[in-house]
Amino acid sequence: MQKAVVSTSPDVKAGRTPLSREQIGGFWAVYLGWVLDGVDSVIYALVLVPALMELLPLSGIKPTAGNLGMYGSILFALFLIGWGLSFIWGPLADRFGRVRTLAASILIYSIFTGAAAFAHNVWELGLFRLLAGIGVGGEWALAGTYVAESWPEDRRKMGAGYLQTGYYLGFFIAAWLNYTIGAQNGWRAMFLCGLAPAAVAIFTVCKVKEPGKWDRASRRNAQRVSQNAVSPLRLIFAPEFRRRTITSAALVGVAIVGLWAGSVYEASAVVSLATRAGIGKADAIRLASIGAAILSVGTIVGCLVAPYLAEKVGRRVALGIYFAGMAVSIVIAFAWAYYVPDGLLPFMATLALLGFFGGNFAIFSLWLPEQYPTKIRATAFAFNASIGRFIGAGVNFLLAAAISWQGTLGAPVAWTAVAFGLGLLILPFAMETRDTRLPE
């Protein structure tokens, strides 16, 4: 098992270093981008049922419960494939800078989320979600890398936790938009709201400076750039980094499986349970929004606890606690609450647990940058996240088949808890980086 060399530099344990105006402004710029990324990611989950109810007949497909579940899962999988293809942003960020590349990724997902409002059939919607996913997927790796490199050593770990809350604040905002705009004006209006991040992209390019670590590394490596230079994608599989790349990609894959079980299928499950209870369409949509809000509040708390726990017990043990909690929460929600009579209330209650343990992504935000030097950090972060998303896409294709075969959402989603058991087996082989400085 790998263990990083512990730094004895006294400034690691020193009091908090004050943040400069530039560091604060840069953080809020990438944080806002991460918030809007969360809005974009959950919009589709919230409007899944009404969108497919309209688009499936236009595509020559009956909107049965089985088809809603199957095509919904296929479109989720296409979005995750787009996320997976977002690994292209990592090498671009290592070559051209974090800020410009981040702005480009935000612009891409903004444009294609808005375009989804004009889909005429389910296949057009799938294409737009695939392309939006390529942009959305770049945000986490690039924003996480930016904060790790721009904030002082004694502040960056909590900075990772703060940053991750933005994604789930986006869930809360999307829930509010769906409760108000979506319930009154329909699913197309929700996708139009996704155009807002374009303004953030323009602001990011104009106002935010590159982190000093990247500037220094860029100058050091400037003379090495040639046709014979080794690409960052090859370097992350060099003997020094191979094990951490493989284990990190696998662990992110496990986390993404849980994210999509807990958050993406939440709205469909709530609408299904509300309909079963005799609740009308508009009120069912509002209940799904309330469920998303519960999920997001729980996850924000989990994100804030994660860095503290990771510092106390180490990255591997902290992630193991979150993984075990996710497994138990998924089983309670989808194998039990989803099937009991009057299960709507207990299912809504379990969303707080699903949310809290879904905060495990904050551990990755501080852990992945610690495992790689600056010259390949964005590439490594983006690659590990992308492979995880491909794993998640594969699971969603399997879920689509299982939901269609069984005619139910609960049991197939409950089986995703098995992934967290596999994650617990992988964790001992991962690299522990507690008490280490961010590599130059």
Image (cartoon, helix red, strand yellow):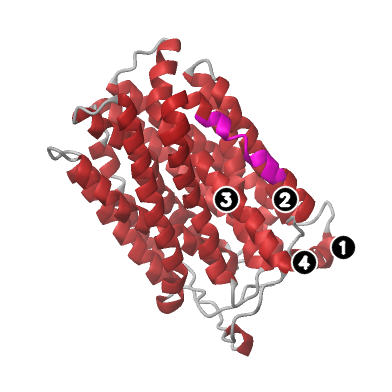
Q: CB atoms at circles 2 and 4 under 8 Å apart?
A: no
Question: Which numbered mark, 1 or 2, is in the foreground of this view?
Answer: 2
Q: Position of residue 246 (x, y in %)?
A: 50, 58
User: Is residue 239 placed above or below 189 in the rendered structure?
Assistant: below
Question: Which numbered mark, 4 or 3, is in the foreground of this view?
Answer: 3
| Earlier-in-chain disc, 2 versus 4 | 2
User: Is residue 305 placed above or below 291 in the rendered structure?
Assistant: below
What secondary structure is found at the residue carrying circle 3? helix
Question: Which numbered mark, 4 or 1, is in the foreground of this view?
Answer: 4
| Earlier-in-chain disc, 4 versus 3 | 3
Q: Residue at x 71, y 71 (%)?
A: 20
Q: How many marks?
A: 4
Inter-mark Cα distance, 4 to 3: 25 Å
Q: Residue at x 38, y 13 (%)?
A: 61
| Earlier-in-chain disc, 1 versus 2 | 2
Inter-mark Cα distance, 2 to 4: 21 Å
Q: Is residue 420 left or right of residue 187?
A: left
Residue highlighted by disc 1: 223
Q: Position of residue 280 (x, y in %)?
A: 27, 25
Q: Label 3: how many residues lie within 10 Å, few (<14), some (14-19) or many (20+)?
A: many
Kind of residue indicated by mark 4 = Ala
What secondary structure is found at the residue carrying circle 4? helix
Most prominent secondary structure in the magenta stretch? helix
Which of the numbered marks, if any, corresponds to residue 204?
2
Residue highlighted by disc 4: 217
Inter-mark Cα distance, 4 to 1: 11 Å
Question: Which numbered mark, 2 or 4, is in the foreground of this view?
Answer: 2
| Earlier-in-chain disc, 4 versus 1 | 4
Kind of residue indicated by mark 1 = Gln
